Image (cartoon, coloured by chain):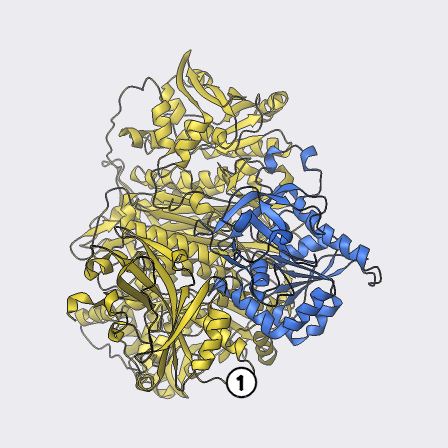
C-alpha cells in the first residue's frame, strides 16, 4: 500500500521535485500539484494522506518569507487544510513551507487559528547554506529511530521568535546542537499538538543519498550503508500512514508525476 | 527651512501625471512592536541605523478600510510588528518619541518612478488575494525604507553622500534626508507616490540620412546607436538605392528610415549582438622577431579558431547536438536527455548598478537556457567575477562606483538571482586585479536539461512556421534597459544612459519558467527564444530568420506605463520576457492563466523576407531581413604582436617558506570564499554531489562541481572553469592555453572523463580597434589573435570542442581625460561526464598514512606566479602548457579514479604545489610531511622555492592508500609521477629539501591564514 502524497508547487516554490523524489523513494505515490490547480479542484486534497509544502521563495520572500503564501492558502484553502489536519493526515512544511505554516497559524498549535510565533531574519542577517547537526525527538512519528544527525540549512529567515507567554516545549521536534541562526532554544522544527504536522527549517529532502553529505568522500562504503536520515523522515511518514490507514487502496510507488495544470 | 536641511536629489525629471494629481496618497509605516528589536543597517561612520519598511498607495477613491485590512493581514508580522496608516498631509504621524535612542535625522528611500519594485508587486498581489470577491479601485503600490538616524555629527549632505551606494543607488532610487524634529510637520520632505509621468506617445520620426559624415557620426552618438561612420554610410547607401526606395514607396513608407528601423538596425548590428570583431578580416603581423615579421591573413577569428576547433573535432564527438547556433550549446546526455550550457557577461550594467546588473545577468542567462531548443530546465548556475580589490589603492572617477559597492551589490544580486529562482550556484571564481576598475567583469553561466524528444520532434531544434503567432510571455515593457546592447558596445563614459539600468524579478521569471516547461511538454509552442539584449528587435528579428519574415503589432505589446515611443517598445530590454511562436494560441493562453503568467499575441511570422512593424494599423517599419542580418560589411582590422619586454628581478630563496606560504594563503586571489559561498544556495534541486566546500569541516575548496542531473541515476555532470588573466601581461597565448588547461584539469580532479569534455569561451577584452584614444589597439587585437590560436591548439589536442561562447570587447573606461583598460581576460567553462557519482573525488586528505603524490612536470614557471607577486619579483617566463603530456596525464588520472585508487586529488594553480598541499591539509584534520627532493632530483635546474611555488600547469596533488601506490604508478607509466610524502595524523605540516626543513607549521595555522583573509569586504559578518 502506497500512501498518496501531494506536493504543492507554484508561486516561487522550488523544491517540489526533490521533495517528491524523496517521498517516492520512501514509498509514497507522489503528485506535484500547482497551487492554483489545487484551488481550482480542492477535492484532490481529500485523496491524499500526505501533504508537503516544499522549500523555495514563494512570492519572492517579499514582505516576509512564507507570508503571502500563507495568506493565499488561508484565503483559498483554509478550511480544507484544517479538515486535513483534523483527520490526522500528515503535513510536512520544509523551510519556506515551515514559514508558511507558522504564518498560517498552524504551528505550533493547529487549533489556535492565529499566528503564535514567527520565523524571521537570522541573527547573522543573511542567508546561510551549510550542513548543521540537529537533535530530533525520537518519540514523534516523524523522527522515530533518529537522534543526532546532519541536515543542510538554506535560509535567510529561520530564527524562531516565541512570545513569552506561548508554551513551546511540547512542540519541539528538532533542535540545532549549536546556535546556528539565533533561533529560540535553538529550535529547528516544530510539531503540532496532534503530532501530525511537522515544520522544519533544515532540508530532509536534500539528504536522501549519502553522496549529498559534504563529507561523504571521507566515509567508507560501510559508513554509507544505513538509510540517510533525511530519507528516514519520509519513510517514517509513509510507515505511519501504512500502519494507521490500512483501508487506503493499494497502488505502486514510482517516479513522481508532474501533473498537467 | 533652509536648503541645507533637506536633501532630495531626484535625478529623474519625471513628475506626477495629471491624473495622479487627483488621486489620494496613503502611507503605511510597518514598525517593530519593540523598537529595541528594530532591524538595523550599518552606515560607515554613523554606526547601526534602525530602519523599517514603508509603503505608499495611490487610489482614486478612499481606501482606508481596505488598507487597514491589508496592513493587518499581509504587511505586518503580528508577533513582532505593528503599523501606522496615514493619509498624506492630513493624518496624525507615527510617534517616534517613544524610540529608546534619540533620533537626529530621518532618511526615506524609495524607487524612482518606473523602476521594478518587486515588493510593491507582491503587496498588490496580496490585495487581490484578500479582496478576491470584490471589485477594487485602481490602487498603485510603492515600497521603500525609513531610516532613523541616531545622534550624529554628519550634516544632511554628508549623510546623503554616506548613504549613496551603501543604502541606495541614485540611478534606481532616491533618498530624502530631513531633521527628525520635523517628522510631524515636514510633509513636503516626505516622498509622495512615485508616479510615472504619462505624456503623449511620441510619434514615429523619420531620420534623413542625406547629411555629411560628421553629422552621420553625431547622429549615431546622440541616439546611442554605437554605429561607426562606415556602418552609418552602409545604411545611408542602402536607403539611397533605387530598389530600396521603390519598395518603400510601394509600402507607403518614408524614403529615409524611421527611428524604429534605425534603432532595430543598430541593435542587430551592435558588437554585442553581431560580434563584429570576432568576424573581422584581420591582418596579423607577428613581429616577435622584428627583423623577420610574419604576416597572416585571418578571415574571422571565430570561424578560424573557435568554430574551427569544433569542426575539426566533430567527427569524433557524436554527442554534439547543437553548437553555436542556439541560445546555448547542446550535448547529448543519455538516450532521452540532453544538457546545454551557456555563459554570458553582464559587465556594463554591473558597473552602474551592481545589484541589478548581476541579478539581470543571472536571470538573463537562465532565459538563454529556457530558450534553448524547445525549452530547457535550468540545472545549475556558475558565476565568475573579476573586481578591483577594495582594500588596495584604486582609481576614483566620478562615474566609477567604489569597488566595495560593486562587490556588495553583485553578491546580493547573485544571491537573489540564484536562490529565488531555485537554481543552485554550484561553482564560481573571484579574481582581483586593480585594472578591473575600468569595468568589473560579471560572468553568469547556466546549464540546463532538455528532453531529446518533444511532441513536435527533436527537443534541441525549433519548429516555427509561417503563420505562427508571435507571443510575448512574462513581464511587461517599460523604458528599462533601452540601449543596453549598444551601450555595452561603448566605453563607459559620463553620459552613459540611465535607462540602461534594470532590476530583475526572479518570481515572475520562476512562474514563467514553470509555465514554459508545461507548454513545451504539451506541445503548445513551436519555438521560443529569450528577450535579452535588443529586446523584441533581436528576439523577433532572429526568429524571423526561421520562417523568413515577421509582422509585429506594437499596440498589442503590454506596457508597464504609457508614454513609450514605438521604437522604445521594440528595443526595450525589460526583464522576464520570452518570445514564443505557437499555432495553438487559445490553449497557450489558458495554460498561462493557470500559471499566473501574462501572455500577449503581438504579431505573426510570415515568409515575405521582411521584418515589418505596425503601430495602430500603420506600417512604421519594414526591414529587408537579408540587409538586416547580412548587410553589415565585414570589418577589416590590423593586429601587430611584439614580445612584451618584461624585467627579470629576483633574490635568493628564503631560509624558511612558512611566512610566505601563510601570506599566500591569505592573498585575496587564494583565500577562502566561504562567506560568499554560504550565501548562495548551492544544493537546491537535490542534485549536489561535490559541493563548493567539502570535507568533514566543510572547508575544502573543491576544484569543480559534480551534480546528478537526473535524480536517482548514476551518471554525474562535472562543471568547472579556468581563468588566469594575469598571464596576459606575458602572452595571451599562454594565458588562454592555461585557462583551457585549468578548466579541464579542475574537472578531471573530481573524476570527469577527459574524453567527454566540452568547453565554452568568454572573452572580455579591452577595445582592440585602434583609434586616437586607443593608441595600442593593434597590440590588443594581436593579443586576441594569440589567445584564439592557443584555444585552437589546446582544444584540438585535448579533444574538447567549444559548444558556445561570447565576447565582450569594450571593457574600457574613458571619460575624455582618463582612460583605463582591463587586463585581457578569458573565462573557459567546462562541462564533462562522470560515469558514476559514487566515484567522485574531493580534494581533502582522507587518512593518516596515505601516500602523497604529485603528478605532472614542474618547470621554472615563475612569471605571473603568486609567489613572485607576493615577493615583488619578476620573471620573463610565464607557465607554458604542454597539451600532449597533459592529455596523457588526465587520461591516467581518470583511469585511476575509476578504479578507486585515488583518495584525494587537487589541482595545482595559484601558488603551485605549496598552496595545493596546504589546501588539501586544511580541508582535513590532518597534516602532511613532504620532501621536495624527488622534484629537485628530477629537474636539477629548479631551486627549492621554485619547486614549491612554480605554477607549471597540468599537475595534481593526490593522496593514495599505501597499498594502491604501485597500481597508480603502473597506470602513469612514463608520465611524471613522484612520491612526495605522507598524510600525518598529528596535523603537523612540514616540507623538507635536502635535509633542511623549509616549512614547519600545522594545519590549524594554515586554516586560520586561509580563512581570515584581509578581504574583509565580503566577510561582512562573523561566519555562521
**What chain is tagged by disc 1?**
B
From the top left corner, tell me how far across and down residue B614 is, in percent: 41, 83
Give me the residue at 35% from left, 35% from top.
B667
Please tell me whether mark 1 sits on a helix, a strand or a loop: loop
> Which color has been applied to chain A in this rendered view?
blue
From the top left corner, tell me how far across and down residue B653 is, in percent: 31, 19
Q: Observer-nearest residue: B372 or B457?
A: B372
From the top left corner, tell me how far across and down residue A98 is, in percent: 59, 58
- Density class for disc 1 (Cα within 10 Å; few <14, some 14-19, many ≥20) is few
**Which residue reaches farthest right?**
A247
> Which color has been applied to chain B in this rendered view?
yellow
In the picture provided, is B191 more to the left or to the right than B892? left
From the top left corner, tell me how far across and down residue B178 is, in percent: 24, 66
Residue receiving disc 1: B134
Q: Observer-nearest residue: B707 or B769?
A: B707
**Which quadrant of the view contains residue B563?**
bottom left
In the picture provided, is B420 more to the left or to the right than B753? left
**Which residue reaches farthest front?**
A165
In the picture provided, is B539 more to the left or to the right than B210? right
Amino acid at each position: 500500500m502506497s500512501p498518496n502524497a501531494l506536493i504543492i508547487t507554484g508561486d516561487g516554490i522550488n523544491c517540489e521535485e526533490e521533495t517528491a523524489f524523496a517521498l517516492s523513494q520512501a514509498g509514497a505515490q507522489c503528485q506535484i500539484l500547482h497551487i492554483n490547480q489545487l484551488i481550482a479542484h480542492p477535492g484532490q486534497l481529500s485523496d491524499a494522506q500526505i501533504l508537503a509544502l516544499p522549500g523555495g521563495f514563494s512570492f519572492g520572500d517579499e514582505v516576509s518569507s512564507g507570508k503571502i503564501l500563507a495568506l493565499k492558502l488561508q484565503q483559498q484553502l483554509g478550511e480544507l487544510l484544517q479538515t486535513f489536519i483534523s483527520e490526522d493526515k500528515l503535513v510536512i512544511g520544509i523551510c519556506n513551507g515551515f514559514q508558511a505554516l507558522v504564518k498560517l497559524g498552524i504551528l505550533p498549535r493547529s487549533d489556535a487559528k492565529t499566528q503564535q510565533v514567527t520565523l524571521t531574519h537570522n541573527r547573522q542577517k543573511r542567508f546561510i547554506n551549510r550542513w548543521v547537526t540537529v537533535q530530533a525527538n525520537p518519540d514523534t512519528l516523524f523522527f522515530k529511530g533518529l537522534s543526532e544527525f546532519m541536515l543542510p540549512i538554506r535560509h535567510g529567515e529561520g530564527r524562531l521568535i516565541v512570545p513569552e507567554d506561548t508554551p513551546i516545549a511540547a512542540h519541539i521536534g528538532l533542535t540545532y546542537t549549536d546556535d546556528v541562526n539565533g533561533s529560540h532554544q535553538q529550535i529547528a522544527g516544530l510539531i503540532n499538538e496532534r503530532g501530525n504536522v511537522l515544520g522544519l527549517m533544515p532540508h530532509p529532502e536534500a539528504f536522501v543519498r549519502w553522496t549529498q553529505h559534504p563529507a561523504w568522500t571521507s566515509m567508507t562504503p560501510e559508513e554509507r550503508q544505513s538509510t540517510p536520515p533525511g530519507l528516514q523522515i519520509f519513510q517514517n511518514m509513509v510507515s505511519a500512514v501504512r500502519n494507521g490507514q490500512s483501508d487506503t487502496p493499494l497502488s505502486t510507488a514510482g517516479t513522481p508525476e508532474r501533473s498537467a495544470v | 527651512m533652509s536648503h541645507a536641511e533637506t536633501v532630495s536629489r531626484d535625478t529623474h525629471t519625471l513628475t506626477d501625471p495629471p491624473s495622479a494629481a487627483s488621486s489620494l496618497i496613503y502611507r503605511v509605516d510597518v514598525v517593530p512592536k519593540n523598537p529595541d528589536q528594530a532591524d538595523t543597517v550599518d552606515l560607515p561612520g554613523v554606526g547601526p541605523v534602525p530602519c523599517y519598511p514603508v509603503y505608499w498607495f495611490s487610489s482614486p477613491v478612499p481606501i482606508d478600510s481596505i488598507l487597514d485590512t491589508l496592513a493587518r493581514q499581509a504587511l505586518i508580522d503580528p508577533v513582532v510588528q505593528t503599523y501606522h496608516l496615514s493619509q498624506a498631509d492630513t493624518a496624525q504621524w507615527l510617534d517616534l518619541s517613544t524610540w529608546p535612542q534619540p533620533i537626529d535625522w530621518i532618511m526615506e528611500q524609495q524607487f524612482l518612478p518606473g523602476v521594478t519594485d518587486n515588493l510593491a508587486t507582491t503587496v498588490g498581489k496580496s490585495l487581490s488575494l484578500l479582496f478576491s470577491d470584490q471589485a477594487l479601485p485602481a490602487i498603485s503600490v510603492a515600497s521603500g525604507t525609513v531610516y532613523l538616524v541616531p545622534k550624529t555629527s554628519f550634516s544632511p549632505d554628508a549623510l546623503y553622500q554616506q548613504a549613496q551606494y551603501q543604502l541606495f543607488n541614485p540611478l534606481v532610487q532616491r533618498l530624502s534626508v530631513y531633521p527628525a524634529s520635523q517628522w510631524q510637520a515636514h510633509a513636503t520632505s516626505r516622498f509622495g507616490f512615485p508616479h510615472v509621468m504619462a505624456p503623449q506617445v511620441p510619434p514615429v520620426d523619420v531620420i534623413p540620412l542625406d547629411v555629411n559624415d560628421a553629422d552621420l557620426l553625431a547622429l549615431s552618438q546622440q541616439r546611442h546607436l554605437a554605429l561607426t561612420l562606415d556602418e552609418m554610410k552602409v545604411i545611408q547607401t542602402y536607403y539611397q538605392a533605387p530598389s530600396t526606395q521603390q519598395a518603400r514607396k510601394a509600402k507607403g513608407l518614408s524614403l529615409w528610415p524611421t527611428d524604429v528601423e534605425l534603432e532595430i538596425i543598430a541593435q542587430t548590428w551592435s558588437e554585442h549582438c553581431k560580434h563584429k570583431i570576432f568576424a573581422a578580416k584581420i591582418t596579423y603581423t607577428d613581429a616577435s622577431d622584428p627583423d623577420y615579421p610574419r604576416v597572416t591573413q585571418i578571415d574571422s577569428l571565430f570561424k578560424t579558431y573557435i568554430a574551427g576547433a569544433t569542426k575539426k573535432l566533430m567527427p569524433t564527438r557524436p554527442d554534439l547536438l547543437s553548437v553555436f547556433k542556439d541560445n546555448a550549446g547542446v550535448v547529448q546526455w543519455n538516450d532521452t536527455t540532453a544538457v546545454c550550457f551557456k555563459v554570458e557577461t553582464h559587465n556594463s550594467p554591473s558597473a552602474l548598478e551592481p545589484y541589478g546588473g548581476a541579478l539581470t545577468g543571472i536571470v538573463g542567462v537562465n532565459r538563454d537556457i529556457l530558450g534553448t531548443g524547445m525549452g530547457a530546465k535550468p540545472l545549475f548556475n556558475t558565476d565568475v567575477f573579476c573586481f578591483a580589490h577594495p582594500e588596495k589603492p584604486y582609481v576614483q572617477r566620478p562615474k566609477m562606483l567604489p569597488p566595495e559597492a560593486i562587490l556588495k551589490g553583485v553578491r546580493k544580486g547573485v544571491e537573489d538571482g540564484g536562490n529565488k529562482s531555485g537554481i543552485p550556484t554550484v561553482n564560481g571564481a573571484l579574481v582581483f586585479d586593480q585594472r578591473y576598475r575600468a569595468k568589473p567583469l560579471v560572468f553568469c553561466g547556466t546549464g540546463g536539461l532538455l528532453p531529446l524528444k518533444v511532441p513536435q520532434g527533436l527537443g534541441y531544434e525549433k519548429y516555427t512556421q509561417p503563420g505562427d503567432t508571435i507571443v510575448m510571455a512574462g513581464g511587461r515593457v517599460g523604458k528599462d534597459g533601452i540601449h543596453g546592447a549598444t551601450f555595452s558596445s561603448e566605453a563607459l563614459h559620463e553620459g552613459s544612459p540611465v535607462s540602461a539600468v534594470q532590476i530583475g524579478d526572479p518570481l515572475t521569471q520562476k512562474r514563467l519558467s514553470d509555465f514554459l516547461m508545461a507548454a513545451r511538454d504539451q506541445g503548445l509552442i513551436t519555438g521560443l527564444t529569450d528577450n535579452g539584449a535588443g529586446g523584441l528587435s533581436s528576439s523577433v528579428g532572429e526568429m524571423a530568420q526561421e520562417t523568413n519574415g515577421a509582422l509585429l503589432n506594437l499596440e498589442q505589446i503590454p506596457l508597464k506605463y504609457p508614454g513609450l515611443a514605438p521604437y522604445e517598445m521594440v528595443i526595450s530590454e525589460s526583464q522576464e520576457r520570452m518570445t514564443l511562436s505557437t499555432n495553438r494560441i487559445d490553449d497557450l493562453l489558458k495554460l498561462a492563466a493557470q500559471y499566473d503568467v501574462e501572455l500577449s499575441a503581438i504579431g505573426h511570422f510570415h515568409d515575405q523576407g521582411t521584418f515589418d512593424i505596425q503601430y495602430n494599423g500603420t506600417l512604421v517599419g519594414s526591414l529587408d531581413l537579408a540587409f538586416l542580418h547580412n548587410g553589415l560589411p565585414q570589418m577589416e582590422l590590423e593586429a601587430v604582436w611584439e614580445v612584451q619586454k618584461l624585467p627579470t628581478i629576483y633574490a635568493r630563496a628564503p631560509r624558511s617558506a612558512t611566512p610566505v606560504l601563510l601570506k599566500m594563503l591569505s592573498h585575496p586571489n587564494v583565500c577562502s570564499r566561504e562567506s560568499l559561498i554560504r550565501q548562495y544556495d548551492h544544493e537546491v534541486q537535490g542534485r549536489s554531489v561535490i559541493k563548493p566546500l567539502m570535507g568533514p569541516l566543510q572547508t575544502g575548496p573543491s576544484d569543480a562541481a559534480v551534480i546528478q542531473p537526473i535524480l536517482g541515476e548514476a551518471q554525474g555532470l562535472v562543471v568547472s572553469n579556468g581563468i588566469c588573466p594575469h598571464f596576459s601581461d606575458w602572452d595571451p597565448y599562454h594565458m588562454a592555453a592555461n585557462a583551457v588547461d585549468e578548466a579541464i584539469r579542475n574537472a578531471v580532479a573530481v573524476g570527469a572523463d577527459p574524453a567527454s569534455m566540452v568547453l565554452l569561451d568568454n572573452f572580455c577584452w579591452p577595445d582592440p580597434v585602434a583609434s586616437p584614444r586607443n593608441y595600442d589597439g593593434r597590440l590588443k587585437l594581436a593579443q586576441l589573435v594569440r589567445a584564439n590560436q592557443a584555444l585552437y591548439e589546446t582544444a584540438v589536442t585535448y579533444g574538447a570542442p567549444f559548444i558556445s561562447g561570447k565576447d565582450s570587447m569594450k571593457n574600457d573606461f574613458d571619460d575624455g581625460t582618463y582612460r583605463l583598460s582591463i587586463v585581457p581576460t578569458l573565462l573557459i567553462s567546462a562541462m564533462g561526464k562522470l560515469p558514476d557519482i559514487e566515484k567522485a573525488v574531493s580534494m581533502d586528505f582522507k587518512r593518516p598514512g596515505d601516500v602523497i603524490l604529485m603528478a605532472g612536470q614542474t618547470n621554472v614557471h615563475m612569471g605571473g606566479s603568486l609567489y613572485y607577486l607576493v615577493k615583488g619579483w619578476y620573471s620573463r617566463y610565464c607557465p607554458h602548457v604542454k597539451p600532449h603530456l597533459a592529455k596523457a596525464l588526465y587520461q591516467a588520472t581518470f583511469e585511476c579514479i575509476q578504479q578507486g585508487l585515488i583518495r584525494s586529488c587537487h589541482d595545482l594553480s595559484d601558488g603551485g604545489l605549496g598552496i595545493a598541499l596546504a589546501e588539501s591539509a586544511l580541508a582535513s584534520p590532518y597534516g602532511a610531511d613532504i620532501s621536495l627532493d624527488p622534484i629537485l632530483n628530477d629537474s636539477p635546474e629548479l631551486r627549492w622555492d621554485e619547486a614549491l611555488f612554480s605554477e607549471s600547469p597540468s599537475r595534481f596533488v593526490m593522496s593514495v592508500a599505501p597499498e594502491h601506490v604501485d597500481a597508480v604508478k603502473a597506470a602513469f607509466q612514463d608520465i611524471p609521477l613522484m612520491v612526495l610524502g605522507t598524510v600525518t595524523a598529528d596535523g603537523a605540516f612540514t616540507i623538507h629539501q635536502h635535509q633542511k626543513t623549509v616549512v614547519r607549521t600545522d594545519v590549524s595555522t594554515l586554516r586560520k591564514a586561509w580563512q581570515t583573509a584581509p578581504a574583509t569586504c565580503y566577510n561582512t559578518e562573523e561566519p555562521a
